[in-house]
Amino acid sequence: MAGATVTDAERQAAAMAALAGAEALADGERATGLTQLEGGWSRQAYVLATADVAGATREFVVRVKPPGALLDTDLRQEFEVYRLLGARGIAVPAVYAYEAGDNAFGGPFFVMDRAPGTSPNVWRRRDRVELEANWEGGGSLAEDLLTSLVRIHAIPERDAPPVLPRRDFEAAVSHWEEVQGSMALVRDPVVEDAYAWLRDHPPDPIEPTLVHGDYRIGNCLNQDGRITAILDWELSYVGDPRYDLGYISLDYEAGRFTQPGSPLLGSIADREWFLDEYEARSGRPVDREVVRTYAVLADLMLTAILTTGIRMYVDGRSTDVRMVWTRFALSSLRSELTELMRY
């Protein structure tokens, strides 16, 4: 249906057909509405509402990779990761159907349950206050986030979906360096030096596992102080699990922007508690210098992604003003790079 005007009714029918093909619908269950959610940088999302003959209602999420997505990642790998994690009892929505052919959504899509809860924004002060209060009140969110991370990292390479990319440390560094180099409008000596710094600080290799790649409380739904679902697996890969520790340890992921964010790791937990508990529960030593190395790589990954958004806007491949607005975040990431490398 490329190039054709598509109605919501056609999209709704496509989603229902996918669910019917997966035998996920009850007898007589029908669609009652389709609403596109706000946001979405590399994916679009729609909520599909249904009702059965007895009046019982359900909601599904249709996750779509549109043309010109910010990140050229494989939607199929997300679907397969959700399916794997769901089978292992990790907090993710159940997935039902994946469609890759020409369809009314204009790109590959899959359908999953809509999990309850909301996602906090650590760059919004009131959300940070609530997250910090949860830690002071017992840390149920930190406990859930830590427990899930240990379980995710317990999935070895052999059990990970074959569609997932496999990247050791050097491959991960080279990947984001190539993205940065192809998308940057101007050269940045700090960024270039950081890639050289990484190659001077390679961590000792360990057994690869499933890596989320964007692990933070903002990619989780929570309700009543408990995590109900872990979302956004588009950056997942098989590699060094310590990458996720470096990523979540960034001050940027604790809300640092033009002003300091939370003193807590990821706005949810005492830093040493989180790393010590991860070590104890995973049985995997946590060298703080290795965490620092992966924090540098995570910072560079975010820099490359934001740089890609700016390039897409400047080149006219996107009219989403958020793409170019993210230039204001680059200064914070750049500053944190210098601190991590101890300039």
Image: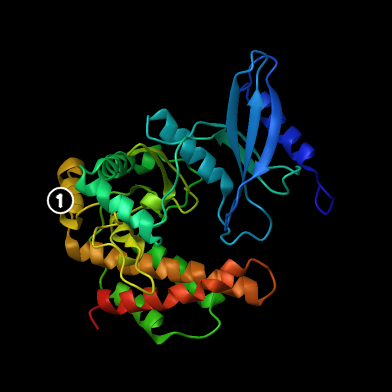
How many numbered discs? 1
- Which residue occupies the foreground of this view, 132 or 10? 132
Residue 296: quadrant of the picture: bottom left
Give the colour scheme of this rendering: rainbow
Q: Is residue 263 left or right of residue 92?
A: left
The C terminus sits in image quarter? bottom left
Residue 241 visible in the current orientation: no
Q: Is residue 213 left or right of residue 37?
A: left
- Which residue occupies the foreground of this view, 66 or 36? 36
Residue type at numbered disc 1: Asp
The residue identified by callout 1 is: 276
Residue 86 visible in the current orientation: yes
| Up/down of 62 relative to 52, above or below | below
Q: Position of residue 193 (x, y in %)?
A: 35, 82
Question: Which residue is painted at 62% across and 59% down in the image?
Answer: 69
| Up/down of 52 relative to 216, above or below | above
- Which residue occupies the foreground of this view, 102 or 251? 251
Q: Position of residue 8 (x, y in %)?
A: 76, 41
Density class for disc 1 (Cα within 10 Å; few <14, some 14-19, many ≥20) is: few
Q: Is residue 220 left or right of residue 292?
A: right
**Residue farthest along the right direction in this orientation:** 4
Residue 98: quadrant of the picture: top right
Q: Position of residue 181 (x, y in %)?
A: 51, 77
Residue 271: quadrant of the picture: bottom left
| Up/down of 153 relative to 30, above or below | below
Q: Position of residue 158 (x, y in %)?
A: 38, 39
- SS of the residue at dot 1? helix
- Which residue occupies the foreground of this view, 337 or 127? 127
